[in-house]
Image (cartoon, helix red, strand yellow):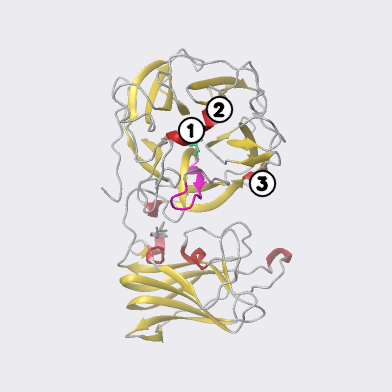
Amino acid sequence: MNRTVIRRTLSAALAAALAWTCLQFASPAQAQAVNVARSATASASYTSSWESVAAVNDGIEPPSSNDTQNPRWGTWPQTGAQWVQLTWNSPVTVSSSDLYFFDDSYNSGPGGVRVPASWRIEYLNNGAWTAVSGASAYGVNANAYNHTDFNAVTTTALRAVLQSGAASVGVLEWKVWGSGSATQAGNPIVRNIYTADPATLVVGDTMYLFTGRDEAAAGQQSFVMDEWHAFSSTAPDNDPATWTAHGARLSLSTFAWAGANAWASEVVRGPDGRYYWFVSVDGATDNGWMNIGVAVSDNPLGPYVDAIGGPLISDSTPNSSALNIDPTVFIDDDGQIYLYWGSYWQPRMAKLNQNMTSLASAVTTPTGLADFWEAPWMFKRNGVYYMAYASNGGSGCVTSSSYACIRYATASNPAGPWTHRGVVLGQVTSTTNHPAIEQFNGQWWMVYHTADAPGGGNFRRSVAIDPLYFNADGTMQQVVQTRGGA
Ligand code: FUB
């Protein structure tokens, strides 16, 4: 099959699909309350054309007040009294808030947006804006949340009125704690953006989740993917409240040689203790299609830099796959490192050197991965090697070859041969299917993506997580997919 046919086949194999509510964060101090801001619609007195008022309740944790990576609300060049408002479809009862100001003077920024001179919280009270009573504090700190307790009010709208000081004003995130109109628990676990191609990594007491981001417009029939996001949890579950969003942590711009398609990825801790983010990207400077690149960082959340300066795997790699995507890296107990990848029914494997950035063997073709399509995920349990992968054929799997289930195979050697064991995750609502399997605190999890989010589709996917159980003989039970608290 030539490249043109392959591309058309990919497009044909993937068909497509609103306003919604989002991820919540619960801190110990608000154990009973939920962040109802996530289910509100944000509006403002004024928003600079390059900023976004939706940023104030998008659930992304600001790295600092001068956040240059994530969406922000700012009013430059407007000054004076400026407000940002949260509106709910039905009444909420709220009694505290945490507000994080946008201030770009930090670290020698231009300083066109600064913390306000003062501010207050108002609520809609029988059609009139009324200041909340009993406010404990209206802090104006940068690089931190400013917490305010106040006497509980029941309302459909709340606003923060900011009086500018040295410059214009802005807000990066506003959490409002209360009850009512709360986001429904359950899959999908990220609700403010569309996410796809999950990969997990456990570091100490934290499970990290790395995903691609689907940015296709409603109805668009192709992938628009430019960046990868990170999330974390110390108690992973399918309740969005158990996950913290860290925003985009890697993008195409990290790879000077890449042009498009921030597709599936995986982060692995290398022998040197650093974190290696293996990604699928379309190279801009070669004649081929997709490549596998590697970025490296001292921290799971970055910052990441290109570790090679070019692709690790490309179409010019001898015996590479028809489509060089979907890397999964496995480090065995003896320290040997293995890279698996591939699509279009062509799985591939090569050993990696200890530097994680060069091949230590020729590329080989694993055998026994019955009906392999793409998206391999490798792990080891009780001395047995497991390979899960997306399959678009075979019995008991899919209603049409446009869709994929997740099959798995086992082996006694990481290089195979593999023995097919069956289906561990059935067809999902998106045409593509992509697994990450992880154990955390004794519980195994299947992380995957679907088209289940409001406005979702084949190119607007959302990550979900459900428990995975092993039988006594080491086989895996088929995962029960849940959604929306079901
Ligand atoms: O997200 C783009 C591609 O779709 C991934 O690389 C595949 O695994 C499939 O999920």
Numbered circle sitting on residue 323 = 2
Whether residue 175 sits left or right of residue 82 in the image: it is left
Q: At 71% across and 66% down in the image, what residue appears?
A: 109
Q: Position of residue 237 (x, y in %)?
A: 36, 46
- Identify the element where label 1 is drawn: helix
Total count of labels: 3
- Magenta-span inclusion, residue 41: no
Considering only order in the chain, which callout, 1 or 2, is on the residue closer to the N terminus?
1
Q: Which residue is mark 1?
A: 10
Tell me which amino acid carries mark 2.
Answer: Leu
- Identify the element where label 2 is drawn: loop
In the image, which is nearer the foreground, mark 3 or mark 2? 2
In the image, which is nearer the foreground, mark 2 or mark 1? 1
Query: Where is residue 397, by image quadrant?
Result: top left
- For residue 84, above or below residue 363: below
In the image, which is nearer the foreground, mark 3 or mark 1? 1
Q: Position of residue 220 (x, y in %)?
A: 47, 48
Q: Position of residue 209 (x, y in %)?
A: 48, 43
| Image marks 3 and 2: residues in contact by CB distance under 8 Å | no
Whether residue 478 sits left or right of residue 464 in the image: it is left
- Magenta-span inclusion, residue 217: yes
- Identify the element where label 3 is drawn: helix
